[in-house]
Amino acid sequence: MADVDEDTLSRTHIDPESNDISDETQDFRFLSSLAQTGDHPTLPKRGEKDFERHGTRAQEDVLSVSRQAMHDALSYPRLHKPNGLTGLFNPDDESCVVEEPKGPNTQNIGKNDSHGRLHLLPEEALYLVERGSLNLQWRDEELSGIPLSLQAAYAHLIGSKGLTLERYTVYAGLKRSGYLVQRAPTWYTEDHDKINMPPHPPRPSSPSSTFERLYKFLFYHTPPADPPPLGPLVQPGLYSSYAPIYRRLALIPFHDPTVPPSQPPSSTLYHSSIRPTYHVWKPTSTFRKSAPPPPDYRICVLNARTDPFPVLDQLDDLMRYVPYQPPEVGSEGKTYVRLRHGYKSVILAVVDQGIVSYVRVGDAGFGVEPVWDRRVGRGGKSGGGGRGGRGGTSGRGRGRGKRK
């Protein structure tokens, strides 16, 4: 009965729209050319793929050969370049040293000493070993000169000096994409109190002329500090715009990112602290690893299996270690652009079993920006119209137009 059901399922029509082609069995016979020895191996072309099983011996043989070709390609030994780098790994202090650094791979990684040697961090050494650019050898009396395999490098470097598999996964992915990556000063969470972040600059006050002060006095009424205990929130009067009305309706206190925090949050009492892990720069030829410029991105690595998504207190605590970067001068009026930019931002790299998802978290000022201003469009362009204040058209407003 089970055989009949399997035969029936094998003949069932599969909807091509609901079927993902990437889930089908691939023809990996084209990988067999990679296992062949040669000085200049080339990438082979992809083979054909059978979408349905018809139960013939020919198809089973093709599937068996395809699986064997994939196994041979994965088990092919990865050799180091003969003119590559040679590093020494000391298991006592978990250090990786390159005696004679050379090539472009050493320009933006590691730290050089006064003797010309290059000291590599565990993630830097493991990345070079994985891509075949570094021949890492033991620096030990018993194992001196014996190279470390890729498996041995993973076993000894993962867990060394605060490096986890999730942190290395993010580091290797960013390096393969061409970014410049360095450890953040808050790499070790327990040492975060020693980091002196730049002070929060005060909110700039733009100078105003006599005409501007007179205009604001006549047309922009400043709401009182506290709403009136009795009566309407918006007192009867002459209002030339919606701005003072919306200001008087703002009853709920909002977060102002331009004001420095008065006291640290209490997230460490109930939740684990999270800190920026990496500083990332876009690739540039003027980058100097000894004096790097301010990073373009700050990455915080999280393990999805052990670390839940940060709560508001944790994010508030994290933003205290991110420098203040307000929107650019001249972006006033571009409300949505300023909200997307924020005053502080950090990228959360959530790693789930090797799959990295990047989430950008910004400290935006929704209460500071005039989101209620109908004259400001999505791109900062004026959207106001005629006297009626409805915007977007050139009409005269409700009740003032002429009938034809």
Image: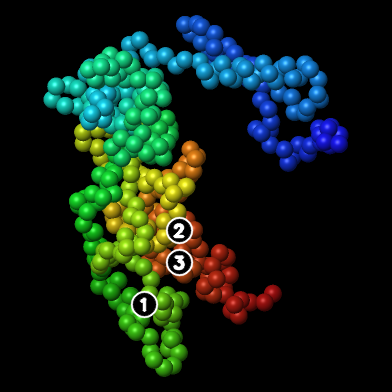
In this image, 70 relative to 232: left or right? right
In this image, 62 relative to 375: left or right? right
Tell me the CA gap for discs 2 and 1. Answer: 23 Å
Tell me the CA gap for discs 3 and 2. Answer: 8 Å
Residue 199: image quadrant is bottom left
Q: Earlier in the sequence, mark 2 or mark 1?
A: 1
- Res. 31 mark: none
Q: Residues within 10 Å of mark 2 (few under 14, many from 20)?
A: some
- Residue 13 is situated, as x and y percent measured from the top left of the image, at 82, 36
The residue at which mark 1 appears reads as 220
Residue at (34%, 84%) from the top-left corner?
226
Label 3 with label 2: CB-CB less than 8 Å: no
Tell me the CA gap for discs 1 and 3. Answer: 17 Å
Q: Secondary structure at mark 3?
A: loop
Amino acid of disc 3: Val
The residue at which mark 3 appears reads as 371
Q: Residues within 10 Å of mark 3 (few under 14, many from 20)?
A: some
The residue at which mark 2 appears reads as 336
